[in-house]
Structures are given as C-alpha cells and as structure tokens.
Image (tube, rainbow, N blue to C red):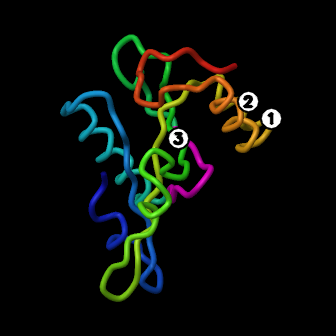
Amino acid sequence: MTAGCWAAIEKDGHGLEFVMTAHVRDQQFIDLMAMITYYHCGGHQLDLEHSMPIGEPWVPGSNCDHLLISLPYLHGPDFEHCPLPGGHARILWTLPVTAAEIEFRRRHGHEALEQLFDEAEIIPTDPFRASVV
C-alpha cells in the first residue's frame, strides 16, 4: 500500500492512497507501489477507473502489464475510506491487467470489463491468469 500520496496532493483534506494485493512478498511490488506514487503525484493523477502501463510484466512471464484502478473489492467496503486528522484518504485497488483488457475497457467501459472478471472468476492475485478477452 502506498503511504504519502494523500499528503502529497490532498485537496481540502481529501486524497488517494493505493493498495496492491500480491501472491507473495517481494521487493518488486514495493518498487511498483513507488512507481504508482511517483506517477500519481507527478502530474498524472490517477482515480477510479483509470489505468496505467507498467512497462513490463507484473512478474516475469505474466501477461499483466498494466494496472487498473478499481474499488478494493478483496478487502471489503470498509477498507475504501480511511479517516485521517483533518480529512480522509480514499484507498483504491491497483489490479494488474493485460493490454487486451485495457483495450476492451476503452471500447466497452469499465463496468463491462469488471463483469468479465466476475464471469471468469479471476483470481486477481494470480500473476499468470489468462486474459478475459
């Protein structure tokens, strides 16, 4: 999970933090969260239903080379809102996805893609999951 995005660019006490759920603990995921923070705070503000390329597979051999900003479904609805002194942080999930899934989302919308994820019963922490499109 990022720590500091909220403070770096909060507006009126409200800002975003990001969480990623991975299958193992690994330094590469910490590096990826740092990249998300840099991207978000460096002028490319991310929000719900946004995406970003990560420039390489999520893990070697994975087809997932983008991140989709979504609600933190795996963690339950109470996880999304974090009260802080003077405001709150909204915590959004960074879900690794494929380029084909991002292209599908561009053509058919975010909800249509999430419906495909539900129908396929993806395991979002599986770096080797098949693309749903």
Q: Quadrant of residue 42?
A: bottom left
At 73% from the left edge and 44% from the top edge, which residue is drawn?
A: 111
Which residue is the site of mark 2? 104
Nearest the camera: 20 or 123? 123
Would residue 23 appear left or right of 15 to someone viewing this image?
Answer: left
Residue 7: where, in percent of width, then height?
32, 73
Which quadrant does the C terminus fall into? Answer: top right
Residue 3 against residue 53 in the figure, above or below = below
Q: In this picture, which residue range is highlighted in magenta?
A: 44-52
Residue 53: where, in percent of width, then height?
51, 34
- Give the amino acid type for the residue marked by disc 1 in the picture: Arg
Residue 129: where, in percent of width, then height?
49, 17
- Give the amino acid type for the residue marked by disc 3 in the picture: Met
**Per the image, is 48 magenta?**
yes
Would residue 119 appear left or right of 94 to someone viewing this image?
Answer: right
Q: CA distance from mark 2 to mark 3?
A: 14 Å
Asked whether the residues under the numbered discs 1 and 3 touch, taking CB atoms below 8 Å apart as contact, a structural biologist would say: no
Q: CA distance from mark 1 to mark 3?
A: 16 Å
Nearest the camera: 42 or 22? 22
First-in-chain label (1 vs 3)? 3
At 42% from the left edge and 76% from the top edge, which residue is drawn?
A: 10
Which residue is the site of mark 3? 52
Asked whether the residues under the numbered discs 2 and 3 touch, taking CB atoms below 8 Å apart as contact, a structural biologist would say: no
Q: CA distance from mark 2 to mark 1?
A: 5 Å
Label 1 sits on a secondary structure element that is helix
Asked whether the residues under the numbered discs 2 and 1 touch, taking CB atoms below 8 Å apart as contact, a structural biologist would say: yes
First-in-chain label (2 vs 3)? 3
